[in-house]
Amino acid sequence: MSKAHLDVVLTDTIGTINPNIYGHFMEHLGACVYEGAWVGEDSPIPNTRGFRNDVIAALKQIKAPVLRWPGGCFADDYHWQDGIGPRESRPRRINIHWGGVVETNEVGTHEFLDFCNLVGAKPYFAGNLGSGTVREMRDWVEYCNYPGDSTLALQRAENGSKEPFGVEFWGVGNENWGCGGNFSPEDYGTEYRRYSTYLRNLGDTKLFLVACGPAQNDLDWTRRFFTKLRKDYWQGTDIHGYAAHYYCGTAGSATEYTVDEWYELLYSASGVEPLIVQQWALMAGFDPAHKIGLIVDEWGTWHKPAPGHNPAFLWQQNTVRDGLVAALSLDIFNRHSDKVVMANIAQTINVLQAMILTEGEKMVLTPTFHVYDLYSDHQGGESVRTLFVTPEIETPKGKLPQVSGSASIKGSTLTLTLVNTNATEVAETSVRLLGGVLKQVVSTTGLSFPDGDIQAHNTFDNPEVVTVASQDLVASSDQFGLVITLPAASVTKLTLEI
């Protein structure tokens, strides 16, 4: 048995945990949108205006705050006017990025915004800078947000929505260092200036414009982009968010791996923390008042595609190991709530580190979904300082803390989430509260799966191998804190009254 210690400093607040840190990403890729969310009104699968009722209910359960759409790489070859008007008249386009399949455009602006309303999430549109035009993106804003009687607003009304949609979040391109046009940071800086000049608040909704940040922790891209943007510009109001992408994964199977490969992936996942710290510090040199928020609008595990699926569709299973990646990442975002204003895991359904897998009428909730369910109480809470003294696990690339987590307060409720990364050893963890008094342990819940099965995952034939369950882990407690025994390979949430 390993031993760890945690001080929760209740009086040292970091910042409010923006619910959008718990955001999601839906791209027109494989079976994410079509089959995953959209089955059409005539489907025998229970649906509301074409969207699966079981998927809607699941995303409502985890309080999905924001959905990023339509890509991804797809966004920079997507022309929004293809997706409005009568569905039978919409053009059929080739999805050049994801398998060369035909995009029917059945799900366009109106349909996706309807889905967001059904889920209770805000939309985040990724605009087409790569193959589009300034006029095209500017017109999309007008179509969505203008309340008057312009031609585009009247067209929106004819297509079923007299009232403006009020879309707040707009990405000015996506991965423009790669599939979004292969720009240099200087060239993208020029394009960003040009595009954002014409993206206006055409109505009551104040736009939140997001610039394309680096692939992984590329500090050179960030430095060169902000240098090109010019001081008088980036201290203005035309850039509000700066988005990095961070993927981790292995060249091997998503479901068959050794203990060493378990640690390798968890260590790789922890690399999002230096990205946040270093990118934020570099941005401060250009934006000392920190008017620009840091966003991680694509992140998660990327494994070898599953056998039996089109490799271009990026379908992969989701195990306990992926669940721990989600928990480690969300804890990092929580601990840096003063820096991170949004994060969108890739992707919501049937693609990469999905919340949900579907097959015909069947639906499976993954370990990653259950982690989001456990962590949802953090949304909107005040993040407080957590100081860990923990054993470390040696990996080929560096040391991985055995025990880590995050804490947040809402009123008199303290939510504490803890991860034991050790695949085989429990961790007896003492928790001390500084600056407050523990009145009672309200509940202890965590991932539940067969003991020792670090490859555990849910399938369509056996969908409840990994679930969330109440757990009796607290060995002792008093007004100063508690002692909790964290199982090996575990994610645990404590709800405490203080």
Image (spheres, grey):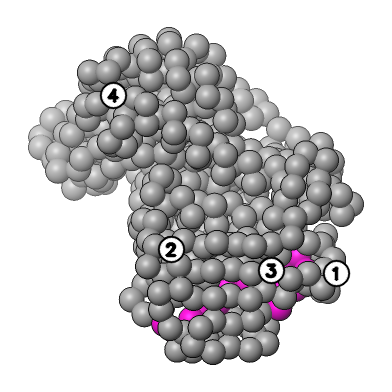
Q: Amino acid at mark 2?
A: Val
Q: With 356 as the anchor, is 211 left or right in this view?
A: left
Q: Is residue 80 magenta?
A: no
Q: Residue furthest left?
A: 148
The circle on residue 4 is 3
Provide the secondary structure element on which disc 2 rests.
strand
Q: Amino acid at mark 1?
A: Gly
Q: Which residue is mark 2?
A: 384
Range of magenta residues: 485-498
Q: Callout 3 environment at 10 Å: few (<14), some (14 to 19), or many (20+)?
A: many
Write the residue at 29% across / 42% down.
167
Write the residue at 45% across / 20% down.
223
Q: With 386 as the anchor, is 112 left or right in this view?
A: left
Mark 3 or 1, nearer chain start? 3
Q: Amino acid at mark 4?
A: Trp
Q: With 296 as the anchor, is 486 left or right in this view?
A: right
Residue 212 placed where, x, y %? 44, 27
Write the residue at 22% across / 18% down.
232
Quadrant of the image occupied by residue 321: bottom right
Q: Amino acid at mark 3?
A: Ala
Residues at marks 3 and 1, CA–CA distance in whole angstroms: 21 Å
